[in-house]
Structure formats: C-alpha cells, structure tokens
Amino acid sequence: MGCTDNQNCGDIPEYDAVTKLNALPVEKCYECCDRKGCNYHLCKHPKPSQCKDDKRVDCAKMNEMFDICKDIHDAKLVCPNFCNLCRLVDGSWADWSQWSACDVTCGNGNHTRTRTCTNPAPSYQGLECEGKNMDFKPCQRPLCPVHGGWSSWSDWSACPVTCGLGQQKRHRNCSSPYPLRYGDHCFGDPVDFKICIEKSCDDGIWGNWKEWGSCSTSCDSGIRQRSRSCVNLVGTICNGNSLEVQLCNRQDCPCNTMPTLRNGVLKRQSESPSKITFNIVCNDGYQVAGQNHTTCDKKSGWSKLPICKLTCGEPAVPSNGRLVFTSGIVFESIAKFECLSGFISFGNPVSTCEGNGKWSTSLSCASVVKTCSARLTYNASYTNVALRKTVELSSTYSAACIGAKMVDGYFNNVAITQKQYRPFAIVDLEDIYSIFSIYIVNRKDCCATGLKNVVIQIGVEANKLVTVARHQTAIGAECTLRFENPLRGRYVKIMLEITEYLQITEFQVFSQTRT
C-alpha cells in the first residue's frame, strides 16, 4: 500500500467516491490499483500524533477495497486503530556517546563516537532508525619513529692490486630511510669484502705499511684498513697480503654496554648527570695497576680502563746459579742472582716481577772454556744431528758462503757473514736432542782470522736460548766443546761477542740419545 514511485496511475478524476466525502482538490497519486485515483487519501495523510484513525478516511471501506492493513507502515499513519497497530513503535536514536580517545599513539588517527537506536527502540515491527550509528573525526599524535633501512649496495671497488690476490669492497648506508625519532638503527654490516685475483706478480719485496685509515664508525664496531705495496726486486717473492683489515671502535656507543675488564670486574659506585663511576675489583691473585676506579662520560664514552696484573710466584733460579735475595715474592718485587764458582754471568743478575705476572729475563750462568780439544772419536751411538739441517746466518758475505755449507759434511766449503757486531749462525736440529758436544772447524786460510770471544747458546725455542758456554780466547783450526751433562735443545747458536766476521767451515752437533 501507499504511493509508489515510477508507477504513475494517471490523473485522479474530479469526483469519485472518496473525494466526495471530503471535497478535496484533484491531485495525482502514484499507486497501482484497479482504477485511477483510487488511493488518493492514502497518499495525502498527516502523521498522527496518537493512536486514532484519520477521520477523512473510511478505513473499513479502504481495507475492503485495497486490504490496506497489509502495508503496516502506511496504515499506521491513517488507520492505526482499525489495523490494530497502536503498539507499533518506530525506533529513534539515543544521544551520541562521548568522543573516544585517539586510536593511535603516533601519526594520524580518529576519534569515534556511537549512538544506539533505543530512544525508543523499534518494537512490534516498527522501523529501525535511519542513519549511521558511528561517527568519526580526525586526530593527530606526535610523528611515529622511523626505523632505519639499508640502501642498495654500492658497486664493488676496483681490485687494489695489479697482480696476485687483493680484496674488493662495497658499501651500503643506513639511509633508506635514515632512522629518525628514536627508530631502530639498521642491523648488519655496512661494508662487504671479497677476494679478487689478478695476474701473477713478479718477484718483489713488501714496502712499509701505510698508516691505518679512519674507522668506518665511531662506536658499535667499525673497520679500518691499511695497505702496502710490493716493490719489484728479482730474487725475493712477496708473501702475505697487501691489505690488512681490523675491527675498530668495537665498544658500544657511550655507556650502553659495560666493557670487559680482564681478570677483574667493574662495580657501579656512583652516577651524576654527566658520568658514571665504577670501582675495579680484581680476581684473586691479581692486583690493580694504577687507580682503582674508572668513569664513563655519557657523551664521550669510557676512560682508559685500569689493568689487573698478576702477582709473581717464586723466581726460577738459573742453572749453575743461586738466588741471593728477594724483597718478598709479591707484586713489583725484585730478585737478585749470582753464578756459582767456575761459571760466569751472562745477562741481568736482577729480575723484576712485571705487570704480566712474570719475572723479567734473569741471569744465565755459562761454563768458562779456556781450551778446546780436537775432534773426539765417537762410537756408533753418537750422531751428528746438525748434518744438512736448516741454518740461518745473521748476514751473508756472498752467494758462495751460504749458511748451509757449514753443516754439509764437506770440510772444504765455508760459510761466512759480513763484518758486524755479534755475528751469529743458528742451526735448527728439527727435533729436540740431548746434546753431548759441539765440534767447530775454522779454516784460517779463508777469508778471515780465527774465532775468538765465542758464545754458544742452546734452547728448545729459537727466541728463548740460554748461554751454555763462552770461549774468550781465539779458537784454532778446530775445537770440540764437550758438556759434562748433556744439554736438551733443538736450536744451537754460535755467536761472536765482538765486531768481526763469523767464518765456519763445519759446525757439528753430537747427540748420544734422542729425547
């Protein structure tokens, strides 16, 4: 029922049964029915203020003709009492709620408010409220943090060498985007490396390392590098790398992370707006060297950390020597040694407990050899363990006088150094032996005078040799130095305690048993 759009039934006649009742003017009605103007009064009714039928409408007649009570939402306006629609209630909106808080913590968002169709709520087939139950209005908060993102990798740099192996690198920046407003920094490395291989290099020697380059970052680990060049020189091959890279500024940015104190710990003592102070507590057996506290400046970072140094134990007494006195075997103490009768000192007789917890190099007590014999006669159980072993000279007089010739077993060859202070030759026996004697052959007719002020040193490691014999007078054409007790060692060194040539035809080391 009711007036329906787009279904024009035409003009209403001047008179019909309905219009005669009320003498209303003729108008158009948009309602499909069995004749023109049949539902005129249903299209022109006022909204009632209470539950009563419109007096201008014959509800019984209309219902009989058009069954008007089936269209309850039109019938309620003209014949609610007749159609038993007095309890029908259309819904109406309640008041809006308060605006909500902004729905974001940063950036752009919205406030919202709601209302309900409860004033009154629709009942008995009443209509729902028209319109939206939710309303929005924009709100703004501080701009959001921007987390950093890596840019694309740069192109690989050119290979830094023209021959051999080199190292290329490429870079990327935390700029896509830059971190802003406390956003996270990029995770990962800003520099990448790969090996590059060029053509083979000619023989050459390394030049000096250049100065270290600047660090790639000021904190949170960066890298720096330095380079050197291979200078062409026939006869020597450049071994090693032309580029050296190391980490730098590995500390966290100021005060973010506690540094590691070797052999001790840092304990927070106090804090001010500009710095934090820490006490140093060393582990058992260690003692602080210097001040017992350090600070972290909140702008510039940590000050130099102190060192926890070991206390020294009992010093090792030199062979054929004795400990004369100590000032107490504690940190920064000293000890003095002297050699027994029949032995002469070589080295510093005073040893100091150093900061690394070890005693400094102390005295060596060497046998005094005034005379030496010709080559001894050995049985089959004695072996020349130096034969054809590796020899290093302090310098080489000429290509014809290389060090290997002094242990080749041929007494007509000669090894000779240049004239220098403390010339030496050191033999690597390539294993550890119990050394019984040393036999030296010195041809006076070749190149230099006889040997004098000879020092013999033996040791298990090349950089930790001990003086075991000294022969201050000149040695003749040959000389055998025999030890009362075999000496254990891998390296044997002969050295002159003067400025002279070191000339040797043969240098033999005899061992009776192998350890």
Image (cartoon, rainbow, N blue to C red):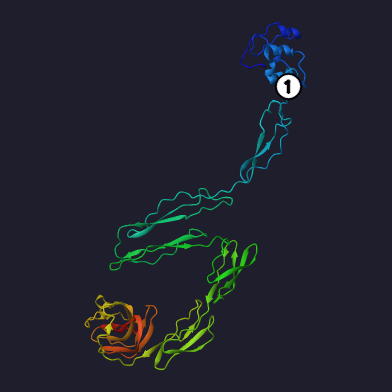
In the rendered image, residue 26, in percent from the top left (x then y), is placed at: 70, 9
Sort mark 1 into few (<14), some (14-19) or many (20+) by Cα contacts within 10 Å: many
In the rendered image, residue 157, in percent from the top left (x then y), is placed at: 40, 54
- Horizontally, residue 330 falls left or right of residue 374, namely right
In the rendered image, residue 352, in percent from the top left (x then y), is placed at: 49, 82
280 vs 172, nearest the viewer: 280
Whether residue 300 can be seen here: yes
- Residue lying at 60% horizontally and 62% vertically, measured from the top left: 298
504 vs 263, nearest the viewer: 263
Q: Is residue 109 above or below residue 162?
A: above
Q: Is residue 469 above or below residue 10?
A: below
- Residue lying at 50% horizontally and 86% vertically, measured from the top left: 335
- Horizontally, residue 305 falls left or right of residue 54, namely left
Residue at numbered disc 1: 85
Quadrant in the picture for residue 348: bottom left
- Residue lying at 37% horizontally and 86% vertically, measured from the top left: 468
Q: What is the quadrant of the N terminus in the image?
A: top right
Tell me which amino acid carries mark 1.
Answer: Leu
- Considering every residue shown, the one lying at the far bottom of the view is 341
